[in-house]
Amino acid sequence: MIENLDKALLRAQEVLASPESIRRICISGRAKGKQPEQVRIDIRPVVLKSGLHWQVVSHDGKRDTTKNLALNELSLAKLFEIGYANILIESTSQEISLRLTKSGDAQLSTKRVELDAAELSHDRSKERLLSADDEIFIELGISDHNGKLKPSRSDKFIQVQEFLKILSHSLDEKRDKSQELKVIDLGCGHAYLTLAAHKYLINQGYKVKTLGIDERQESRERNIALVDKLKMSKEISFQATKIANLELANFDIAIALHACDTASDDAISWAVKSGVEMI
């Protein structure tokens, strides 16, 4: 349903009047012409010594910044003004999705659900979509041979986790997992995200085939040796070519991060022209 943005934000804010029923709030996306400093903001209720508060975790793609707000200090409208385009509110009884339209209005949808109450402990351990002891992190040198995260590689580990969170929120839950999911990484470099995305999707029950594209032949050779060692060569392949020279092909998901020069534009252009479902 399309409606005035201010009215839609007010309706969303009213849901927060019962904070104990809120499981999570996710603010993400980017409004046209805006560039928020944070990639995404996750909010959930937590119990502190002084009572119930909102825990606000801001993600900039590398690090998480956490702060706690009193219940009356959280304003969805003020957060949205920063330049975000989407709000998802998940409670025990309903899921509310607000998306900013090109016209500046809001597309508001509500779905009835029946979910358990959220864990309100302030010291809840951080959710990791792919644990540090996964074999890919060990082979990539992010974790040591015992599966413990190397302090010097924590930034890369966090970056991968943030990317996986974005990927997880973008997946179509109704998709038939028995159908093969084709993924392409445009500008894969050393294949950190290539491998992480592939392994995460496999863990979610998808049948996945992944292709990594990088113009450097040495990257291709290194990555092929890596997936051979991981016994993933039948599922993941690599090609050495410039994105601009890559023939259009059918893929379900295209990923590209930290591409240099015109590679970001080339990646988006290629994915759009190829009709990729999720970019």
Image: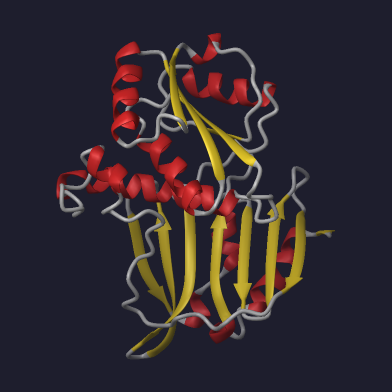
Please name whichever residue, 11 or 269, is drawn nearer the observer in this view of the structure: 269
Q: Give above or below for 207 relative to 270.
A: below
Q: Is residue 218 left or right of residue 193?
A: left
Which residue is rendered at x = 66% and y = 43% of the image?
A: 179
- Which residue is found at the position 33% from the left and 29% from the top? 228
Spot occupied by residue 53 in the image (x, y as percentages of width and height): 44, 82
Q: Residue at x 43, y 68 (%)?
A: 56
Residue 180 in percent (x, y) is at 62, 39
Percent from the top left, x then y, of residue 249?
64, 20
Specify the farthest residue to the top: 245
Q: Does residue 62 appear anywhere in the picture?
A: no
Q: Nearer the viewer, residue 221 or 80?
A: 221
Q: Quadrant of the N terminus?
A: bottom right
Q: Position of residue 16 (x, y in %)?
A: 60, 79
Q: Quadrant of residue 20?
A: bottom right
> How many numbered badges does the structure rendering display?
0
Residue at (50, 82) in percent of width and height: 71
Residue 250 sits in which quadrant? top right
Q: From the viewer's side, name the closer residue of 53 and 240.
A: 240
Question: Which color mode does the image show?
Answer: secondary structure
State which quarter of the image contains the C terminus. top right
User: Residue 274, can we see it?
Assistant: yes
Q: Quadrant of residue 271?
A: top right
